[in-house]
Image: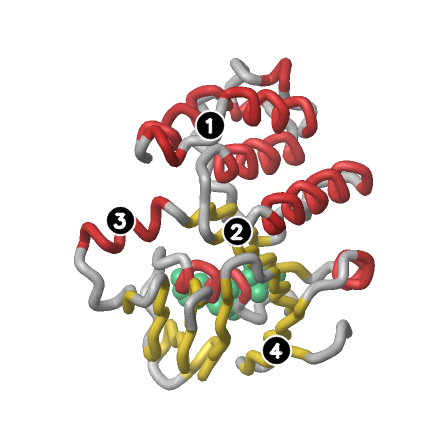
Amino acid sequence: MKNQLLKVENLSKSYTPGQAIWQKVSFELNRGDFLYILGGSGAGKSSLLRAIASFEQPTEGQVICHGLDLKTASYSDLERIRKRIAFIPQNLGLIPDLTLHDHIEISQMAIPRGDRVSDDIIQGYLGLMGLKNKLNRKISILSGGEKQRVAILRALSKKSDLLIADEPTGAQDFEMTWKLMDLFVKINLSGTAVLVATHDLEMVRRLRKRCAILKDGNFKVEDRTP
Ligand SMILES: Nc1ncnc2c1ncn2[C@@H]1O[C@H](COP(=O)(O)OP(=O)(O)OP(=O)(O)O)[C@@H](O)[C@H]1O
Ligand SMILES: [Mg+2]
């Protein structure tokens, strides 16, 4: 299909042989799609997102992005695909001794100039996230919610085809949660496909989008919001 961005086919993951965390996960995402992945703690949301983002190998199955199988893609194709994925990991992956400014700079250094979002947009994000006066502070002295917003801002500092966010608002208050969700929707409307893992049913009911549920190792895209 012309608009297809991602095809996940029969993906399974076992950390211990014979004990699948999730199995036969299959779904497709087109450009501009938005999909929640819902599941309880330990259901396998983070490991599934890492496998889709190619940070972890699945045990079986295929992730096809831009028509390329990530398992067999050449190193340069894989790098090119990764550069167009904005990933907000649950563990944030920030470097405590560096500043927010450093994190944006490092993220942008790794990508072609044309794939960087403009300084004006970054300034807008800093304002929206209440981080304007935190730009030069070390990560180690930021609050938990601020650290999470740094990880979000870093991911959004480049243009992406796919935004993967692993419980991106878990450390935010109500108002900031909705500012961030509004922002994800705007980015989604511009054509970026969005995958959000959450166990926040209230979020899913307020911002109604397609939902998949991960439970007992099985993955099912639902027709209705749970
Ligand atoms: N590297 C690993 N080695 C062994 N087991 C792992 C590894 N990573 C995750 N697991 C196990 O896989 C299961 C799923 O973990 P995962 O982090 O994907 O769940 P989750 O749905 O994201 O949970 P939470 O909502 O608490 O973040 C858990 O039982 C976890 O202990
Ligand atoms: Mg998780």
The residue type indicated by label 3 comes to: Glu
From the image, tell me which residue sits under label 2.
192
Q: Nearer the viewer, mark 4 or mark 1?
A: 4
Whether residue 218 is situated above or below residue 195 in the rendered picture: below
Work out whether mark 3 precedes mark 1 in sequence or the reverse, and give the earlier one: 3
Residue 219 is tagged as none
Residue 96 is tagged as 1
The residue type indicated by label 2 comes to: Thr
- Under tag 4, what secondary structure? strand
Mark-to-mark CA distance, 3 and 4? 29 Å
Residue 133 at x, y = what percent? 63, 14
- Under tag 3, what secondary structure? helix
For label 4, count other residues whose C-alpha is less than 10 Å away and answer few (under 14), some (14-19) or many (20+).
Answer: some
From the image, tell me which residue sits under label 3.
79
Residue 81 at x, y = what percent? 32, 52
The residue type indicated by label 4 comes to: Val
For label 3, count other residues whose C-alpha is less than 10 Å away and answer few (under 14), some (14-19) or many (20+).
Answer: few
From the image, tell me which residue sits under label 4.
221
Whether residue 60 is situated above or below residue 187 in the rendered picture: below
Q: Nearer the viewer, mark 3 or mark 1?
A: 3
Work out whether mark 2 precedes mark 1 in sequence or the reverse, and give the earlier one: 1
* Residue at disc 3, CB closer than 8 Å to ligand 1: no
Residue 226 at x, y = what percent? 77, 74
The residue at the point 44 percent across, 80 percent down is 20
For label 1, count other residues whose C-alpha is less than 10 Å away and answer few (under 14), some (14-19) or many (20+).
Answer: few
The residue at the point 75 percent across, 37 percent down is 176
- Under tag 1, what secondary structure? loop
The residue at the point 81 percent across, 63 percent down is 205
Mark-to-mark CA distance, 4 and 2? 20 Å
